[in-house]
Image (cartoon, rainbow, N blue to C red):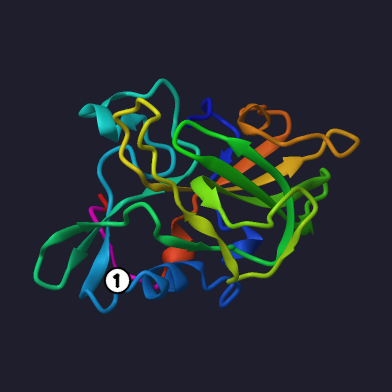
Amino acid sequence: MSAPAGGADPRRAPVFAAGASAFGALLVRWNGLDAAGFAGWEFLDGMRFGERAAWWRQGADRGAPHEGLDLLFYRTGGGARRSLGPGARVPVVLPGRVVSIVEDFLGFSLFVEHGLADDRGRRLHSILGHLAPRRGLAAGTPVLGGEEAGTVADPAGRGTAVPPHLHVTIAMIAREGGPDRLDWDAVRDRGRVLLFDPLPLFDPLPLLGIA
């Protein structure tokens, strides 16, 4: 998933206020990464916000800046590289309401609106991509920060060489009048969307491979 240039803001979104979200810590703890000696997330070129490389295609240009963050690799204290594989449990970023669940090329993307708005009528959303959403989630479902959103999807049988991973986008998105269905085309609409770098969700966890 990629977004066109522009419409991105490196400043911190309200979701990054001190203590607002335990997303990064829960992702590590729920999946036993700490018990495995977790030392930090590792990012290949193209996994981070705004980068253009397709990390799964030896760095070929993905065609547009990355509109979020891809999580797959982490390192142990001994230096071993390990992966966040299919079935890894993924928490909800903040309290809110599910507004859409759409299929993507590895699984499904979960769009959650968090109720915070700016002076242009855009509302804060988190988008968790490449999931197998937990049973019972649907548009309109209220969710709590830190409850389970689903698991990293297994793309077996989808005919893609892209490894299973978790994609995270944070954005302010304007709703188009009514309960329109949000999808990735909406995220690419520069008139509706302001993107933020999700990396602070993982602060103060150690981060590796950051240039």
Under tag 1, what secondary structure? loop
Query: Which residue appears at 40% of the width and 29% of the height?
Result: 158
Q: Is residue 44 left or right of residue 180?
A: left
Residue wearing tag 1: 33
Number of residues whose C-alpha sits closer than 10 Å to that of mark 1, classed few (under 14), some (14–19) or many (20 or more): some
Left or right? Give the position of 194 relative to 73.
right
Q: Residue 98 at what x, y percent from top left?
A: 72, 53
* In the rendered image, the vertical position of residue 178 relative to residue 72, given as above or below: above
Residue 64 falls in image quadrant: top left
Q: Is residue 10 visible?
A: no
Q: Name the residue located 28 percent from the left edge and 35 percent from the top edge.
A: 55
Q: Residue at x 64, y 65 (%)?
A: 94
User: Measured along the vertical axis of the image, is residue 99 above or below residue 204?
Assistant: above
**Going by the image, does 162 lie left or right of 180?**
left
Inspect this view and state whether residue 88 appears. Answer: yes
Tell me the kind of residue under disc 1.
Leu
**In the rendered structure, does residue 207 fall within the stretch colored magenta?**
yes
Which segment is the magenta one? 204-209
Looking at the magenta stretch, what is its main secondary structure?
A: loop
